[in-house]
Image: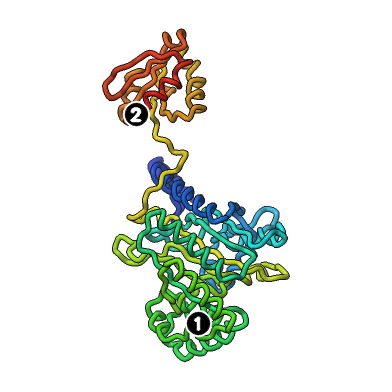
């Protein structure tokens, strides 16, 4: 009989601890980092609301076809990076790798085309891609998206870019510029694609292997290649702007004029196509030119127009739309980030101390009185020792302590101690809020 090798208790412990680790490329967001994320979202939300955008939240999971039809085959996201699963009922679902396709699905499903157009939304949520984790990039990452659906006007493109710039500037970014391009529409892009494909075939030996594969499925993606070998070939590639039809050329010219009028600096980047196949006409990235610690430019947001996405998802009509996505993780880790504090985060002014069972019984009612009066507190009501509770109050640097003992519970009073000089005063509970207003 074959012997079974048993793990030692020590090995079992190691194995168990490994299983308890967060998945690769994902992490817990706690303490100050959590507040940094929350503070950014509140600032982004505030700016978006003032420009007329409204909130929306789409499901974490979508039908796989939402992304394969919308984002398109031949993109890294669909081919390699999606997290997919099959339910017991046979549904084939995917954790959303981005938010735009789900937003358009929601627009179509809920008949939003019958609302006054355009409809403008913002959303903030995690997205998931099985990518190689690296600095500032995770497999679960947070995005703030802003989208306008239902208008093909150039002013809407400019509006979206302006809102993105405003959000980033108020978060602390100072050296922003816009890389922008137009990749045309269905009237003129096929001519450009034919010319581009012909160019790459002539230089196929200079392309990296991955880009030779892209030539068969999605030639535009080669312009966005990160391969050094391909980058050299791309320097001589034909640019999309030269092939724009009159309508696309007019649209692009107007977008640039709006940016100039608002004083937004931009660079026309002929190789900018963005990595998703649903883009059409305007594509852009917002870059912090000194964003990284080593001084290299950092892309903070990217987006563009996606007028044909609705039809790709099964709609009978095109829905003109434009939007962008901000990579929040990258902003939070940037040295220039202002570390915005969420509004709900109030530094406690009071440390509530209770002593004895009689006081403990009434403690929660007193804390609720303070909460309703918007007096932020800290407490350790599970503790019984005066010394341990005062030590925590001192460590937290809270200005005042409320001491509520057996005597105070009987007399409906509380001791207010000034932690800076140890002076204290007994105050009746019915006068407590009035007293606290005077010492604030």
Dot 1: within a 10 Å radius of its alpha carbon, few (fewer than 14), some, or many (20 or more) residues? many
Tell me residue 155's x, y (percent): 55, 68
Residue 400: image tag: none
Label 2 sits on residue: 398
Relative placement, left or right, of 50 versus 424 is right
Q: Is residue 3 above or below residue 326?
A: above
Tell me residue 127's x, y (percent): 52, 57
| The quarter of the displayed image where residue 287 is located | bottom left
User: Are the two marked residues, 2 and 1, in contact with CB atoms closer than 8 angstroms?
Assistant: no
- How does the figure colour the protein chain or chains? rainbow
Tell me residue 113's x, y (percent): 70, 62
| The quarter of the displayed image where residue 12 is located | top left
Dot 2: within a 10 Å radius of its alpha carbon, few (fewer than 14), some, or many (20 or more) residues? some
Q: Is residue 86 above or below residue 414?
A: below
Judging depth in this view, the residue of 286 and 298 nearest the camera is: 286
| Picture residue at 52% right of the left edge, 74% below the top | 254
| Picture residue at 51% right of the left edge, 72% below the top | 255
Judging depth in this view, the residue of 200 and 22 nearest the camera is: 200
Query: Does residue 135 appear anywhere in the picture?
Result: yes
Label 1 sits on residue: 241
User: Which circle's residue, 2 or 1, is located before the other in the chain?
Assistant: 1
Secondary structure beneath label 2: loop
Q: Is residue 252 above or below residue 206?
A: above
Tell me residue 399's x, y (percent): 33, 27
Secondary structure beneath label 1: helix
Q: CA distance from mark 2 to mark 1?
A: 61 Å
Query: Does residue 3 appear anywhere in the picture?
Result: no
């Amino acid at each position: 009989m074959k012997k079974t090798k048993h793990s030692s208790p020590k090995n079992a412990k190691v194995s168990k601890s490994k299983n308890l680790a967060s998945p690769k490329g994902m992490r817990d967001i706690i303490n100050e980092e959590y507040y940094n994320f929350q503070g950014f979202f509140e600032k982004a939300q505030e700016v978006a609301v003032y420009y007329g955008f409204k909130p929306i939240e789409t499901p974490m999971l979508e039908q796989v076809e939402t992304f394969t039809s919308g984002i398109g085959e031949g993109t890294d996201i669909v081919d390699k990076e999606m997290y997919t699963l099959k339910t017991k009922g046979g549904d084939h679902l995917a954790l959303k790798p981005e938010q735009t396709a789900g937003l358009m699905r929601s627009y179509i499903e809920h008949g939003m085309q019958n609302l006054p157009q355009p409809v403008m939304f913002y959303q903030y949520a995690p997205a998931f891609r099985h990518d190689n984790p690296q600095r500032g990039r995770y497999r679960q990452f947070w995005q703030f998206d802003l989208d306008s659906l239902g208008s093909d006007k150039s002013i809407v493109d400019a509006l979206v870019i302006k809102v993105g710039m405003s959000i980033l500037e108020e978060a602390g970014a100072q050296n922003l510029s816009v890389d922008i391009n137009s990749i045309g529409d269905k009237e003129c892009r096929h001519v450009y694609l034919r010319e581009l494909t012909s160019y790459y075939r002539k230089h196929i030996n200079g392309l990296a292997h991955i880009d030779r594969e892209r030539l068969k499925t999605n030639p535009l993606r080669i312009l966005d290649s990160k391969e050094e070998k391909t980058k050299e070939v791309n320097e001589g590639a034909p640019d999309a702007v030269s092939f724009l039809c009159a309508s696309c050329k007019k649209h692009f010219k107007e977008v640039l004029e709006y940016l100039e009028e608002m004083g937004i600096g931009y660079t026309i980047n002929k190789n900018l196509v963005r990595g998703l196949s649903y883009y059409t006409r305007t594509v852009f990235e917002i870059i912090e030119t000194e964003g990284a610690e080593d001084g290299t430019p950092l892309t903070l947001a990217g987006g563009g127009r996606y007028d044909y996405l609705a039809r790709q998802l099964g709609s009978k009509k095109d829905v003109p739309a434009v939007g962008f996505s901000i990579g929040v993780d990258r902003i939070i880790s940037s040295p220039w980030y202002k570390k915005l504090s969420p509004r709900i985060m109030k530094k406690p002014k009071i440390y509530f101390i209770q002593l004895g069972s009689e006081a403990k019984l009434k403690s929660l009612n007193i804390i609720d009185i303070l909460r309703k009066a918007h007096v932020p507190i800290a407490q350790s009501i599970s503790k019984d020792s005066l010394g341990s509770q005062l030590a925590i109050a001192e460590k937290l640097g809270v200005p005042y302590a409320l001491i509520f003992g057996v005597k105070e519970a009987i007399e409906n009073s509380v001791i207010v101690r000034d932690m800076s000089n140890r002076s204290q005063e007994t105050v009746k509970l019915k006068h407590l809020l009035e007293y606290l207003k005077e010492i604030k």
